[in-house]
Amino acid sequence: MISLRYHIVSIAAAFLALAIGVVLGSTALNGSLLSGLSDEKSNLGNQVADLEAQRNALNARLADADSFAGAMGPKVVQGALDKRSVVLITTEDAKPADRDALRDLVGQAGASVTGEVQLTEAFADPAKADQLRQVVTRLQPAGVQFPTAGDPGTLAGALLGSVLLLNKDSAQPQSTPDELAAALGGLTDGGFVRPSQGVKPAQQAIVLTGGQATGDGAGDRAATVARFSTQLDRAGAGTVLAGDPASAEGTGAVGNARADTSSTSILSTVDNVDTAAGRVTVILALREQLDGKAGRYGIAGNAEAPAPGVDQPGS
């Protein structure tokens, strides 16, 4: 007869065997799993190393290309703006190094820089829009007709265009020296601009901005600079709005201008002014503006070509 003790021992043995099997099975599984994960980690590490090597190689090639563009730039633009004049207009986030390099390249192209006007943060601040509109309207020179559009960017472009840019047909001032001084003085007193000393009217303008606007009202700030640049273009012999690649995004001034067909039909934009090649493109775009043409240039997806006269890769 099978005793109760036998039953207990048999059940205990069965559970012990099951436990041993689970332990042995999980140990083998864990070993296999860990080995697989280790192999996967090694493969991923190799892929990362390969991608880093490719990135470093591409960066080196870009650096070489930019160095070449920097060395050849003065020769490429030589005489492109012979005996012309250009006024620089910058936003607060524009890089001084880009401004200085552009100033040098304008001179190497044969043109003179007549001065610089910096647009302050308040200029594009949506909270200051009504104040800017009132100041601009009060400073309207006699005989100058402003556009019916009531946004402050367009109105400010009309005001500064009338005093900072020469007539595109006659190359003569469109306002008196007193009206120029009054416009810059009024906007300075209002906290909207910071002009350099002795700014004079020019035939063309470069509006140099930084990257993508961020924070509350970013889109409105970008739109103000874009509309200002467009109206400035209408006032003289041509304007180029230039920024870095981030400026070509939706909340960047370049991107905002490119999204508006009324701007792209007359205003030229460059989205890689932080490179030597981009700065050369700005000069070539100014030259193209003198011929009544405009384009979207640079490396962003919404650019139509790297530079005037250069086809987009793959086109």
Image (cartoon, grey):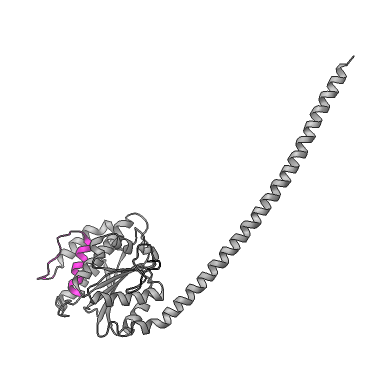
Residue 86 in percent (x, y) is at: 26, 78
Q: Nearer the viewer, residue 214 or 102?
A: 102
Quarter where residue 156 is shown: bottom left
Q: Is residue 89 above or below residue 72?
A: above
In the rendered view, does 289 fall on the left or right side of 77? left
Q: Is residue 11 left or right of residue 99?
A: right
Outermost residue toward the front?
315
Q: Is residue 204 magenta?
A: no
Q: Which residue is pictured at 73% across the width and 46% down the height?
A: 31
Q: Nearer the viewer, residue 193 or 172?
A: 172
Kindly identify the residue that appears in the image at 31 percent across and 56 percent down. Answer: 219
Q: Is residue 210 left or right of residue 136?
A: right
For the question of whether residue 90 can be seen, the reply is no
Task: Indicate yes or no whether the magenta region holds residue 160.
Answer: yes
Measured as percent of width and height from the top left, residue 25 is found at 75, 39
Which stretch did the figure color magenta?
Answer: 141-163
